[in-house]
Image (cartoon, rainbow, N blue to C red):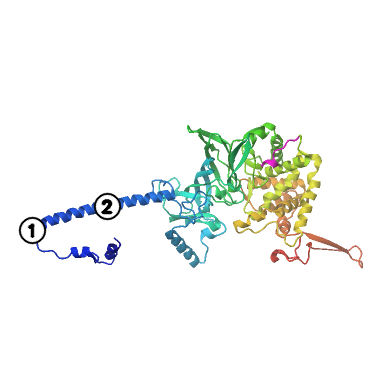
């Protein structure tokens, strides 16, 4: 067989040397009858051979398709040819769900990518998927997300439909996706039946993005729908969509919950995972009926199936960022209360903790604090409900997901009859902090992570203001703030290795480092300094204007400074807050003031300042930010 194929490839239509070649030599002449018989035999054998070859080819084709299906999973079709199959991804196509980066792509896909990267190199530009931030040519308007949670094997599948608005023409759709297996992709023009053909798709792990390459560019000022079908693991690492467990009556029970801040929503669904990309979300969760599901919004309808499954459809959210989207699948119970303005507050926890009343203290102060914040900010709480979820394990003390705040049990459950005052204070301040985020962070979100102090500094400052509202005799803002915040952060900020409150953030790997005590404690100290400088009533009026102007949107530090400057102007004071505060937020450290009297001249003193550093001989890590000639 091999030799025959070689002969045909070389243009030799004869048989290869050997005994069969001798048998095929010249034959003696025969009669016409014999010739006719031979022709019929040859024709018959030719037809039989053709049929045999056809059958073999069909069988081989079927076998090949079965192998491909086994590797890539069951194919899906939309009927218009624009639904791409499993993404060509660097490692992982055909691997277990949630690990797409562990395998090898086909040579053809790699060659296509290399060709495209070479083209971008010729332009002396990074391709859009290799840049540290997402390209700005698309903007998500709405996500419709359907999830199936399989708690018995800790996996989930999802289908996300993203409505996209095109700002600049491009044939690339670049969005975040990490540690998942993409089954199918479809792009269609909104309100039209025709699809936009997908040329290919691939993951780019270096920036944790998924790239959809189209056959033609998307048109400016048009709306498109991006549909992605995928599956992944319910992780065991406390980030993304992860699992936790507890023991009740000797039985281990599991729950699934999310932690998306700052960059982990991309592990749970393909999305534009940057704070600036606010959109509305409509979430549906299908799970076993022995569980309940929670999300940012209340359940609109629940559809029960005969096989013991139920699908919960949640109301649509307001405009929000991906990092405080949330959901949970658990079998907890709850207690509830209602605020004066009609906000339903529930606390969900293990059934035994609810029976003991361990969540009652947190539930009661949450009601009071929502009413306090609504009155202080003059901006109502924006959602119809707020759920507090107490989980056994969580990477942080708490997370301020809008309408579904998640707390580790030790920071929300207590028994006031036996818990110490220090423990009660700790629980109180964590709850005050997270509730402040429902306004500073969720309702108004920083444009980018360089100004994370715009939410964390305010929440840390209001830990003391809110606790004073609950316990006026404790004088938290005037006394405890000094020892717990101001003095502590002065120790850190007096080091040569300190950094400004507002830090430049380029790579996703840089984001976690900005969540430090400088952002929290110095941010809070600067806000307190500003409130004292402006006067508390004017400062409060400025915050009310800031939240009203920027609600459901994003804001940067200059937006805050401009609003506060206008508040001062309304009471007859002309002060440029930006000029004052840039010296404190864009420079690290703080000054030491020297006052000298002039012995030769009466009534004259000399005042000077310089940046205070504990070790004046120490070299700063960043010489650009280590200039001792700073002025404050």
Looking at the image, which residue is at 55% across and 38% down?
315
Q: What range of the chain is rendered magenta?
A: 408-416
Q: Secondary structure at mark 1?
A: helix
| Label 2 SS | helix
Report if residue 415 lies within the magenta region: yes
Give the left or right position of residue 272, taking residue 565 as reference: left
Marks 1 and 2 sit apart, C-alpha to C-alpha, by: 33 Å
Q: Nearer the viewer, residue 537 or 132?
A: 132
Q: Quadrant of the C terminus?
A: bottom right
Q: Residues within 10 Å of mark 1 (few under 14, many from 20)?
A: few
**Label placed on residue 48:** none
Q: Earlier in the sequence, mark 1 or mark 2?
A: 1
- Taking the image as drawn, is residue 217 in sight? no
Residue 192 in the image: state x and y as whole percent: 42, 46
Instruction: Please give left or right for residue 102 compared with residue 570 in the image.
Output: left
Nearer the observer, disc 1 or disc 2? 1
- State the mark number for residue 32: 1
x and y percentages locating residue 98 in the rendered image? 52, 49
- Say whether marks 1 and 2 touch (CB < 8 Å): no
Question: Could you tell whether 40 is left or right of 349 in the image?
Answer: left
Quadrant containing the N terminus is bottom left
The answer to which image quadrant residue 621 occupies is bottom right
Question: Camera-side residue: 354 or 166?
Answer: 354
Q: Which mark is residue 54?
A: 2
At 29% across and 62% down in the image, what residue appears? 5
Left or right: 560 as drawn, with respect to 330: right
Verify whether residue 267 appears in magenta. no
Residue 393 image offset from top left, x and y in percent: 64, 44
């Amino acid at each position: 067989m091999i030799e025959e194929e070689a002969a045909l490839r070389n243009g030799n239509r004869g048989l290869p040397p050997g005994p069969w070649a001798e048998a095929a030599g010249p034959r003696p002449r025969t009669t016409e009858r014999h010739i006719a018989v031979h022709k019929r035999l040859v024709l018959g054998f030719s037809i039989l051979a053709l049929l045999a070859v056809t059958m073999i080819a069909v069988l081989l084709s079927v076998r090949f398709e079965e192998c491909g299906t086994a590797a890539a999973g069951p194919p899906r079709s939309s009927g218009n040819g624009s639904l791409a199959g499993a993404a060509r991804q660097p490692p992982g196509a055909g691997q277990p769900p949630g690990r797409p980066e562990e395998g090898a792509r086909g040579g053809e896909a790699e060659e296509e990518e290399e060709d495209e990267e070479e083209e971008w190199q010729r332009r002396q530009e990074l391709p859009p998927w290799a840049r540290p931030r997402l390209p700005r040519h698309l903007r998500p308007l709405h996500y419709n997300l359907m999830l199936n949670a399989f708690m018995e094997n800790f996996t989930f599948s999802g289908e996300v439909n993203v409505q996209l608005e095109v700002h600049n023409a491009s044939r690339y759709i670049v969005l975040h996706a990490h540690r998942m297996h993409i089954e199918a992709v479809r792009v269609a023009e909104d309100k039209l039946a025709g699809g936009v053909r997908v040329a290919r798709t691939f993951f780019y792990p270096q920036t944790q993005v998924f790239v959809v390459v189209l056959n033609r560019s998307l048109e400016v000022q048009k709306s498109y729908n991006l549909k992605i079908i995928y599956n992944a693991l319910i992780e065991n690492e406390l980030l993304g969509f992860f699992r936790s467990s507890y023991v009740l009556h000797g039985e281990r029970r599991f729950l699934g919950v999310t932690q998306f801040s700052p960059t982990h929503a991309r592990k749970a669904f393909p999305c534009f995972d940057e704070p600036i990309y606010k959109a509305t979300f409509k979430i549906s969760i299908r799970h076993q009926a022995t569980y309940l599901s929670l999300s940012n919004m209340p359940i609109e309808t629940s559809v029960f199936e005969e096989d013991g499954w139920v699908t919960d459809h949640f109301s649509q959210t307001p405009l929000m960022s991906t990092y405080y989207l949330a959901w949970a699948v658990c079998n907890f119970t709850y207690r509830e209360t209602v605020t004066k303005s009609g906000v339903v507050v529930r606390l969900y926890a293990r059934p035994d903790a609810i029976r003991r009343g361990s969540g009652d203290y947190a539930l009661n102060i949450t009601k009071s604090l929502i009413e306090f914040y609504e009155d202080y900010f003059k901006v109502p709480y924006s959602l119809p409900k707020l759920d507090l979820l107490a989980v056994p394990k969580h990477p942080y003390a708490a997370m301020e997901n809008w309408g579904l705040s998640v707390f580790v049990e030790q920071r929300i459950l207590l028994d006031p009859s036996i818990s110490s005052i220090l423990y009660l204070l700790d629980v109180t301040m964590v709850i005050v902090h997270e509730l402040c985020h429902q306004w500073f962070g969720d309702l108004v979100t920083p444009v980018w992570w360089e100004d994370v102090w715009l939410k964390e500094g305010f929440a840390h400052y209001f830990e003391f203001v809110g606790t004073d509202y609950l316990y006026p005799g404790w004088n938290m803002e005037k006394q405890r703030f000094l020892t717990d915040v101001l003095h502590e952060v002065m120790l850190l900020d007096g080091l040569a290795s300190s950094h400004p409150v507002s830090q430049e953030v380029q790579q996703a790997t840089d984001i976690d480092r900005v969540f430090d005590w400088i952002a929290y404690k110095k941010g809070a100290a600067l806000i307190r300094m500003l409130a004292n400088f402006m006067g508390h009533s004017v400062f409060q009026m400025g915050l009310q204007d800031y939240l009203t102007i920027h609600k459901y949107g994003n804001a940067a530090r200059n937006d805050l400074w401009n609003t506060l400057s206008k508040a001062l102007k309304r009471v007859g004071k002309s002060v440029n807050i930006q000029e004052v505060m840039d010296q404190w937020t864009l420079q690290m450290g703080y000054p030491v003031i020297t006052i000298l009297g002039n012995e030769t001249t009466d009534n004259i003193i000399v005042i000077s300042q310089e940046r205070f550093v504990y070790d004046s001989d120490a070299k700063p890590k960043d010489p650009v930010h280590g200039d001792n000639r700073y002025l404050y």
